[in-house]
Amino acid sequence: MTRIAVIPGDGIGKEVAEEGALLLQELSEIRGLGFELRHFDYGADRYLRDGTTLPKEQIEEFRRDYRAILFGAVGDPRVPDGRHAREILLALRFELDLYVNLRPVKLWADRFTPLRGKGTKEIDMVFFRENTEGVYVDVGGTFKQGTPDEVAVNEDVNTRKGVERICRAALEYARKKGVRTVWMSDKSNAMRHAGGLWQRVWKELAAEYPDLELRHMYVDVLAMQMVLRPEMFKVVVTNNLFGDILTDLGAGIAGGLGFAASANLHPGKIGLFEPVHGSAPDIAGQGKANPIATFLTCALMLEHLGCEEEARIVERAVEAAVAENCLTPDAGGDKTTRQVGDFVRAQVRRMATT
Ligand code: NAD
Ligand code: IPM
Ligand code: MN
């Protein structure tokens, strides 16, 4: 038996996580995968009702008894400081030490990109976003708050262990996939302490990976080149904040957030799987959310669970939805979240049973 936790969260997170859970359930039944899905109601409603964000014991239970978490999204206008979102999502990433945030940027059909002259061949890369350090650690403070002399500090924490392990993860992935050139991106020209560490680690690793070409590009230039020459990039490794921003840029050139999937990993441990997008309060509850990012996220989860064949089936089902334009409005279709979900699951059923 493989236990999978489902945390739908807020807004469209609830809608897309439900589609993903139905897909996993169905695949499990058809192929005898033995998944046991259990839903958890962490999110804004629960937080506003009884103050619970994510109990420590819950994290322990996940660590002990679960192989994967399917996460929708968190964020709710009724919680303007986003406290519950940080205490749920960031706590899972940090407490479970999921240092790899793997985010594919893959264009599924030429018509989805706003980039002229670029298509599926050019836009196909994977980001390795450091996921446990950087400015996300919440080290800092405020001073003289509410006065004209107010000071606010957020420290950027980078450890040798943290930098090295995410760089290695990207390099090992490239080796496995037969990709020769790996890009590391930082801002070492302005941030010399953190950047210096990334630079030193990268140079040291170059000696250990003579079969690969370890390149470097400053993050500002990389952002531009992703738009002008996306074909340059197959594997990119960067820090937490730059990875956050670059992967939304990646979503922008690859059909939008409705297609962007992610996996939070630490080899050998439970994985956290979530679409890159947020809770999208502007379209929540209207059946407009694109569930494809979540289906592709399920494919990443299936890979993590060793179900490679099933992962490919999900991707082929997504290809079929794209080919038939059975898509939500953000992707140029006129279908609802549920209609796309039903279509993709029907494809999966057909491919998984034959
Ligand atoms: P967002 O990703 O929720 O939405 C940005 C834009 O993209 C919106 O116009 C939205 O309608 C559209 N969009 C996003 N996902 C879509 C989908 N699947 N289908 C169709 N359209 C989609 O970003 P935001 O509006 O800046 O954030 C809303 C809330 O979500 C905030 O509270 C934010 O902190 C939170 N957030 C959470 C996560 C997460 O849980 N992983 C990620 C990002 C943002
Ligand atoms: C993401 C989100 C989160 C992040 C927010 C909600 C804290 O934007 O998963 O990309 O910045 O990591
Ligand atoms: Mn983000």
Image (spheres, rainbow, N blue to C red):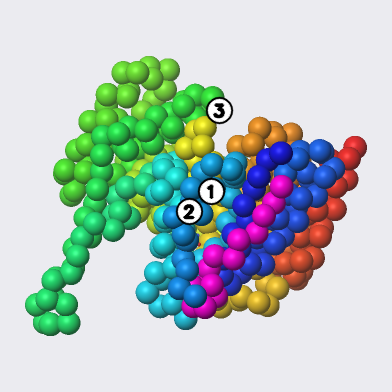
The structure residue drawn at horizontal position 61% and vertical position 75%, both measured from the top left corner, is 284
Residue 287 included in the magenta stretch of the image = no
In this rendering, the answer to whether 16 lies above or below 4 is: below
Question: Residue sitting at 67 percent across and 55 percent down?
Answer: 38
Quick check: marks 1 and 2 in contact, CB under 8 Å? yes
Circle 1: residue type: Glu
> Residue 197: horizontal and vertical position, in percent?
22, 36
Which amino acid type is marked by label 3?
A: Lys
Task: Report whether the residue tagged 1 is closer than 8 Å to ligand 1.
Answer: no
The C terminus - image quarter: top right
Vertical position of residue 47 compared to residue 117: above or below:
below
Q: Nearer the viewer, mark 3 or mark 2?
A: 2
Q: CA distance from mark 3 to mark 2?
A: 38 Å
The N terminus, quarter of image? top right
Query: Residue 2, how many percent across, how many down?
Result: 68, 40
Give the Cα separation between the discs numbered 3 and 1: 34 Å
Q: Which residue is mark 3?
A: 177
Look at mark 2 in the image and give the residue it sits on: 57
Q: Nearer the viewer, residue 22 or 188?
A: 22
Find numbered disc 3 in the image and state the secondary structure of the residue it sits on.
helix
Determine the residue located farthest toward the front in the rendered image. Answer: 57
Q: Place residue 291 in its image quadrant.
A: bottom right
Q: Earlier in the sequence, mark 3 or mark 1?
A: 1
**Residue picked out by circle 1:** 61
| Residue 47 painted magenta | yes
From the viewer's perspective, is 241 left or right of 272?
left
Within 10 Å of disc 2 (Cα), the crowding (few <14, some 14-19, many 20+) is few
Say if 307 sits above or below 151 in the image: above
Give the residue at x 80% y 50%.
26
Query: Which portion, as a residue range, is magenta?
Result: 36-49
Apparent side of residue 13 relative to residue 94 in the rendered image (left or right):
right
Classify 10 Å Cα crowding around label 1: few (below 14), some (14-19), many (20 and above): few
